[in-house]
Amino acid sequence: MTVVEVISIIVPIYNIEKYLSRSIESLINQTYPHLEIILVNDGSKDNSLAICEAYAKKDRRIVVIDKVNEGVSIARNTGLEAATGTYVGFIDPDDWVEPTMYEKLYKQIKKWDSPVCLCNYFKDTKKKSSPKVFSFKDEVLEDKVIIEKLVNNMVGMPDLMPTYVCVMGCVWRGLFKKEFLDTNQLRFAPGVSIMEDLVFMVQTLLKCQSVAIEQGVYYHYVQNPSSTLHTYNKKLWEDQIKVYELLEKSFIESHIEEEMRNRLDFRYIGMVLSAIKNETYMKKDKDSDLKDTVAHIRQICQDEKLKFVLERVKPIQVSEKKPAAKEGGKRLRAIYSDRVVMPKKPKEKKKGTYITKKTSQAKKLEKRAKLSEAKRKPRAKKSLSKAKHYEVE
């Protein structure tokens, strides 16, 4: 007798009526039929709850949980406590997934008997949908390789050189064994409203001995201009500090804090820049109070930890000569930490003639040559030879 294994998919919902139906429809239409779709309404004030209840009447696999607003972390934890499936997945309510996503993830996680399986995703904007794929082709990662290829690149870059490849530490790209999460008491940190899934992912991966990789591209991460990532967040700096401290604590407990130190330092610098951007660029007129803005930026820049971080970070020595980046045989812009190398402008070509770069002096000489060609021809030729020219076959 074949054992049916259910996948519980948890969707935290808050005031997202515009995109919610598309998200739910993409789950209903999955090719893997044995699903439990848990819709957690986190105190929405729009029609999100009504939309959830309407779908629940049409599909018995849908479970609706209505609760007071406590944030995305507690909403996901509520879904985890209610989940009855062997495996769990997560999806944000303004995103959607390809029909075969959970079938593919299920097959891969079973094949390698791993507690976690991750896939690639699309980054969707109004203009286009761009696939974002892993820089490696492995089907499974084990032990220290998990840290080298996943955790390291989720946390941040180790230096200022442009070779760092970011890996999005988002839970929506994965499938997780429920028993593994329960046994290791892995849950989302309450009170953290940004990058809560990064903390969860890092803590989870540090507990894994193997991670299965599905190289297909299945999840659609939609760039929603009204999301928290694109609006002013009054508590951004404080929330970033919480995330940093949780990551640091996880590395200390796993005895890898020293090898992660550079990445944590550069992450801290990035946090400072992000917080300043939030206080300036992200602020709208209605949020603006110049005194508060200046005070907050001063508080960020005078942070004691920032001083220690900047002392630890050493400037990189960059040589004067840099090779131009190449792609498809063409010279492209090459960006380095101290300068930008621009491609040379193509030289003008004209068959069977000399092409001369006309300096101001060359132009004067040419004009004089035209005025009295017969008389000044030898002089003009001699002088024009000083200008750069190219012969084309």
Image: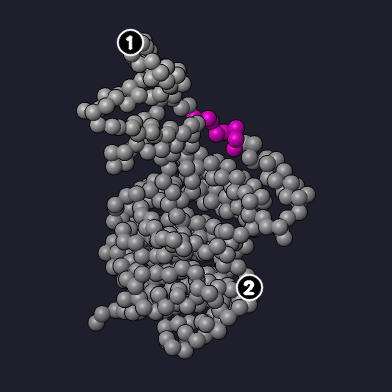
Of residue 349 and residue 294, the one placed in the foreground of this image is 349
* Residue 388 appears left or right of 336: left
Quadrant for residue 8, please give it.
bottom left
Mark 2 residue type: Asn
128 part of magenta stretch: no
Q: Which mark is residue 106?
A: none
Find numbered disc 1 in the image and state the secondary structure of the residue it sits on: helix
Q: Which residues are magenta?
A: 309-316
Residue closer to the observer: 362 or 279? 362
Frontmost residue, 319 versus 390: 390
- In the image, is 330 to the left or to the right of 128? left
- Give the mark toward the camera: 1 or 2: 1
Quarter assignment of residue 14: bottom right
Residue under label 2: 69
On-image quarter of the C terminus: top left
Q: Nearer the viewer, residue 63 or 291?
A: 291
Q: Residue furthest left?
A: 393
- Residue 38, how many percent across, how many down? 48, 77
Left or right: 270 as drawn, with respect to 132 = right
| Few, some or many residues within 10 Å of mark 1 (<14, 14–19, 20+) | few
> Mark number for residue 378?
1
Instruction: Look at the numbered disc 2 and give the secondary structure of its residue.
Output: loop
Against 35, is 387 above or below?
above
Residue at the image position 45 percent from the left and 82 percent from the top: 62
**Residue 63 percent across, percent down from the top left:** 48, 82
Estimate the x, y position of residue 291 in percent, counting from the top left. 78, 49
